[in-house]
Image: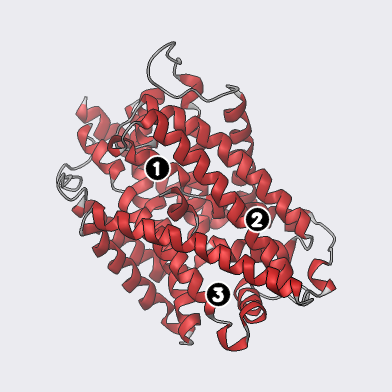
Amino acid sequence: MVVSQVVGVGIFLTPATMMRTLGSPWTALAMWVTMGTLNAAGALCYAELSTRFPKAGGSYVYLREAYGPRSAFIYGWMALLVMDPGLTAALGIGFSQYLLATVGASPELMPPVAIVAIIAFGLLTLLGIGTSARAIQWTAIAKVSIVVILVGAALVRLGEGGVASQAVQSMPLTSGALASSLIAAFFAFGGWWDLGRMGEEVESPRKTMPRALVGGLALVTAMYALVSVAYMLGTSGPASGTDEAFVLRVGASLFGRPAGYLLSGMVVVAVAGSLAAVLLGSPRVYVAMARDGVFPERLARFNVFRGTVPASTIVQVSLACGLVLLGTFNDILGYFVPCAVFFLGLSATAVLILPRPESGDIFRAPLHPLPIALFLVMVVSVLALFFAGQPRQTLLGALVVALGIPASWAVVSGRR
């Protein structure tokens, strides 16, 4: 689930962004290692929290335990109106862009295709956790296979002497290039924390959660680094132009011009798994809120036989379709990512706020409190870069979250 959730449209676009903006492949590899390490530090914190509180809801539960029900409610408000539909919409747009590129259709069809894709994967989720789990499993296997094929093709081309010197040509490293690459890398790693939402349905969480979170991120980091190397070996000139054009050029270079669109088809498979994972895990937050009496029970009614939350899934799909009609891919990112990052860092600090049990069958993050310190450095850096680069979208998302504050006083106080 970690691999399927994380490795989406970013598996091919983000390495392209880094190759275009950073210029040096060694700088790009250093960026992947750095971001992988910082995300792994956060994963250690979440692994500890998920074994201490193995309940549906993930960050919602951690915030409730550390900061009280009102903070947890505001997080749930943000997840319902900002993060979950924003991420679903962004993945739907990415899916449609590369599906249209693969079949050679007009880009003007992007909004309706994205909406159809979101609805289709929502229906897949409603078929049951077994169906979704199989889709996630097979797309995860497909993603690893795609990387192996891509790297293998690049190595074959290297053996044939097809690598041009311009492909490894260094460019001056600017602060703007570094900032855009950092944001792109963070988005490429996004989503691993949602595994905490499934904590109640995981067997042996003390062993499973750390292995899944840290091991999954290690595999993802290796995949991104290998794709960057393949791009370095596969491109025959400076990494200029748009990300989409660069990906198509690399595909044509590695697989031949007739098969150049194969790489776009690979992106479609990658995003399909991410959509399935997001729509499966997101409604677990609303189940936890309904149990606390701060969310309508009808919307969070859990089907124990199918492992689904039908009403919440329908709400998420509907809001995501609305966002597809209202904004571009970058607009949607600026709307939901900063809010998600803020609450991600806040929920991770629960390992500092809550006293650590001296005994019990829980996982304890090593070198405490170093992991949370490293993770917060990354969180603060990403927030500052988003606010500087997309202030309008960031403030819009923050405004929607702020509306949850008066709502929390009414709902939580009424519950008390």
Q: Can the viewer see residue 162?
A: yes
- Looking at this view, is 400 or 339 the one in front? 339
Neighbour tally class for label 1: few under 14, some 14-19, many 20 plus, Cα within 10 Å: many
**Residue 312, above or below 244:** above
Neighbour tally class for label 2: few under 14, some 14-19, many 20 plus, Cα within 10 Å: many
Quadrant into which the C terminus falls: top left
The earlier-in-sequence mark between 2 and 1 is 1
Identity of the residue furthest to the top in this view: 358
Q: Can the viewer see residue 90?
A: no
- In screen coordinates, is 52 left or right of 376? left
Q: Secondary structure at mark 2?
A: helix
The earlier-in-sequence mark between 2 and 3 is 2
The earlier-in-sequence mark between 1 and 3 is 1
The residue wearing badge 2 is 225
The amino acid type found where label 3 is placed reads: Leu
- Looking at this view, is 148 or 291 the one in front? 148
Q: What's the residue at 38%, 60% (across, down)?
A: 138
Q: Which corner quadrant of the image does residue 48 belong to? A: top left
Rendering coords of residue 214 (x, y %): 52, 39
Q: What's the residue at 45%, 77% (across, down)?
A: 99
Rendering coords of residue 168 (x, y %): 81, 66
